[in-house]
Image (cartoon, rainbow, N blue to C red):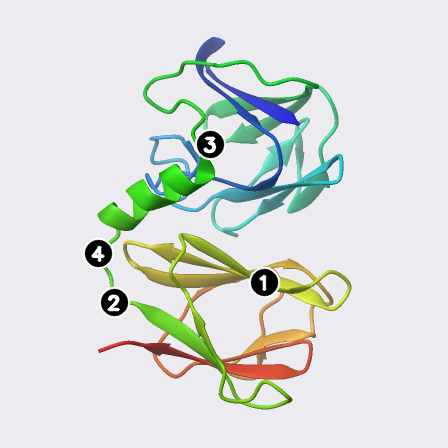
Amino acid sequence: MAKFTIYFNDKVLQSHIFDSGIVRIGRDDTNDIVIDNLAVAPAHAVVVIKEGSCIIKQLNDDHPLTVNSEKSKESLLQNNDEISIGKHTIVHNTTESVAPVQNNNHANQDVSFLNAKIEDKVKIPSANLQVMDGQHIGRILPLKKPMTRFGHSGAGVIIIARRKDGYFISSLEGDADSITVNQQTLADKTINLNNNDVVVIDNTAMQFFLEN
């Protein structure tokens, strides 16, 4: 389990505890940890909590991420690590038990309930990925959640975030050349997907399309 405490000018603003999964950090209110400040990107960083490890990854090149005073695009978090996002500081702590924590209307909530609230706020067209080759050719993969993950560890993993201003793809892990959008490597970029864009991950092509 991981605890994140957000500070501004040495004052505690929020505190969150997560058991596992993907934790989204940013200015947009669709994130799990919301920091309402213009120095923070709408989708600033993502934390992957899995099997006892906690990895934070920068999502926006224009909004840097600093861990323990060093700029980092990806870092394995340790107990008491300090993450700087804009003018805010987030302290990461490991924890063995979960206790209720109150914080500025952003109390830790059940993920399914949080996703349902986000779904009500996000008013953009529904979208899908359609597999274009391989044994699952023609299969439709809906993008209904605020953040959808595709791929496998070791072969490349992407996330597609559904936000108020569209669908955005970024890489969580994988070789820089193994994931492409319209034959251009994704690498560390975050790209706004357009209708009929072609995404290739682990040698499987998928076409992004919006529903009418």
Q: Amino acid at mark 3?
A: Gly
Between disc 3 and disc 1, the foreground one is 1
Q: Does residue 13 appear to the left or right of 199 in the view shown?
A: left
SS for dot 3: loop
Measure the alpha-carbon separation of dots 3 and 2: 31 Å
Measure the alpha-carbon separation of dots 3 and 1: 25 Å
Residue displayed at 64% across by 89% down: 134
Q: Foreground residue, 87 or 28?
A: 28
Answer with the quarter of the image where residue 142 lies: bottom left
The earlier-in-sequence mark between 4 and 3 is 3
Measure the alpha-carbon separation of dots 4 and 1: 23 Å
What residue does disc 4 label?
123
The earlier-in-sequence mark between 3 and 2 is 3
Please tell me how crowded label 2 is: few (under 14), some (14-19), or many (20+) other residues with Cα within 10 Å. few
Q: Amino acid at mark 4?
A: Lys
SS for dot 2: loop
Q: Position of residue 30 (x, y in %)?
A: 35, 43
Between disc 4 and disc 3, the foreground one is 4
SS for dot 1: strand
What residue does disc 2 label?
125
Residue displayed at 56% across by 29% down: 84
What residue does disc 3 label?
86
> Is there CB contact under 8 Å for labels 3 and 2?
no
Q: Amino acid at mark 2?
A: Pro
Which quarter of the figure is the N terminus placed in? top right
The earlier-in-sequence mark between 3 and 1 is 3
Between disc 3 and disc 2, the foreground one is 2
